[in-house]
């Protein structure tokens, strides 16, 4: 059933892409960001996200974030960005994550490419599934097939171990209202290893009796938790995404919705035995505004 849902969404994007003009939408930059700039610019924004998902996985406790950000984008393609994420969940109310990243993006007539390095500083009490990961390196390339844009990317995630990820995206951007309105449907497939996820279960999860999770006081786990497949490279999830943005002068408003279809559940081994992870399809949304100063 999950494969059918993904196939249907994939075919839907391809079908609608036959009738309108296509435009770039960078793999890890939503269409609220202009893909090409002729002048250096400063971007200041704020975004609200209803939950924190990574590779189709999320903690059983929702992690809604309010995230102000600032970034400098040089016309050469170089950029540096920073943000903080304030956890707004009931009973939490704390800065849960600082992010600092830099990178380079190139946009040609048909080809796009780039790379970025991000450093994550999670709060010790964070229960986000990515919270044990500290450094993330990503490189991507994309090609305009006229009917749709295809991106592929490779990433390394560094925690106590090193994870390898590969991903692919197909998207299409539609324009309206004199190009002020952008609508971008996209589908994704993500694969990788899960050493970071094993560490999350051992140190952060709100379900496995660990020390750093929701409301936790300890800094070490009170039981040993392992994921048997943590070093196995495999498909982790499929995703479908719809992003809408509207620009008024130098201000852009945006909203996005994402459906996740995780696959290949992990086998979780604890002191009391082994159990297969109960994966469920997920949904989250985000909305925000961005100001551009040139």
Image (cartoon, rainbow, N blue to C red):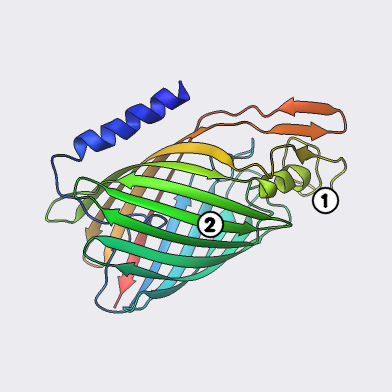
Q: Earlier in the sequence, mark 2 or mark 1?
A: 2
- Residue at 52%, 69% (x, y): give it: 101
Front residue of 219 and 261: 261
Looking at the image, residue 54 lies above or below residue 249: above
> Callout 1: few (<14), some (14-19), or many (20+) C-alpha neighbours within 10 Å?
few
Mark 2, secondary structure of its residue: strand
Q: Would residue 214 be seen by someone viewing this image from the given angle?
A: no
Answer with left or right where residue 15 lies relative to residue 217.
Answer: left
Residue 12 image-quadrant placement? top left
Answer with left or right where residue 138 lies relative to residue 149.
Answer: right
Q: Would residue 121 be seen by someone viewing this image from the given angle?
A: yes
Kindly check if marks 2 and 1 are in contact, taking CB atoms under 8 A apart as contact. Answer: no
Q: Position of residue 18 (x, y in %)?
A: 16, 39
- Residue at 18%, 56% (x, y): give it: 180
Q: Which residue is mark 2?
A: 155
- Residue at 59%, 64% (x, y): give it: 98
- Residue at 72%, 41% (x, y): give it: 205
> Callout 2: few (<14), some (14-19), or many (20+) C-alpha neighbours within 10 Å?
some
Q: CA distance from mark 2 to mark 1?
A: 32 Å
Residue 217 is labelled as: 1
């Amino acid at each position: 059933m999950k494969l059918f849902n993904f196939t249907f969404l994939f075919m839907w994007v391809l079908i609608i892409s036959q009738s309108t003009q296509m435009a770039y939408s960078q793999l890890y930059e939503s269409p609220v960001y202009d893909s090409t700039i002729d002048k250096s610019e400063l971007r200041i924004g704020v975004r609200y996200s209803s939950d924190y998902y990574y590779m189709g996985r999320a903690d059983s406790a929702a992690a809604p974030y309010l995230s102000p950000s600032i970034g400098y984008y040089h016309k050469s393609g170089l950029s540096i960005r920073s943000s903080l994420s304030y956890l707004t969940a009931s009973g939490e109310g704390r800065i849960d994550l600082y992010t600092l990243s830099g990178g380079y993006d190139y946009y040609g007539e048909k080809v796009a490419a780039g790379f970025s390095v991000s450093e994550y500083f999670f709060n010790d009490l964070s229960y986000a599934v990515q919270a044990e990961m500290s450094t993330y390196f990503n490189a991507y390339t994309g090609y305009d097939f006229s009917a749709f844009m295809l991106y592929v990317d490779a990433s390394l995630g560094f925690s106590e171990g090193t994870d390898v990820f590969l991903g692919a995206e197909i998207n299409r951007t539609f324009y309206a209202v004199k190009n002020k309105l952008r609508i971008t449907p996209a589908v994704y497939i993500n694969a990788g290893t899960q050493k970071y996820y094993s560490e999350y279960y051992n140190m952060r999860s709100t379900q496995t009796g660990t020390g750093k999770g929701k409301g936790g006081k300890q800094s070490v786990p009170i039981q040993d938790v392992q994921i048997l497949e943590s070093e196995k490279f495999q498909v982790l999830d499929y995703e479908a995404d719809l992003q809408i943005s509207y620009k008024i002068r130098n201000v852009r408003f945006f909203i996005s919705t994402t459906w996740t279809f995780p696959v290949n559940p992990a086998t979780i081994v604890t002191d009391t035995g082994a159990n297969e992870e109960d994966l469920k399809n997920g949904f989250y949304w985000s909305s925000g505004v961005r100001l551009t100063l040139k």
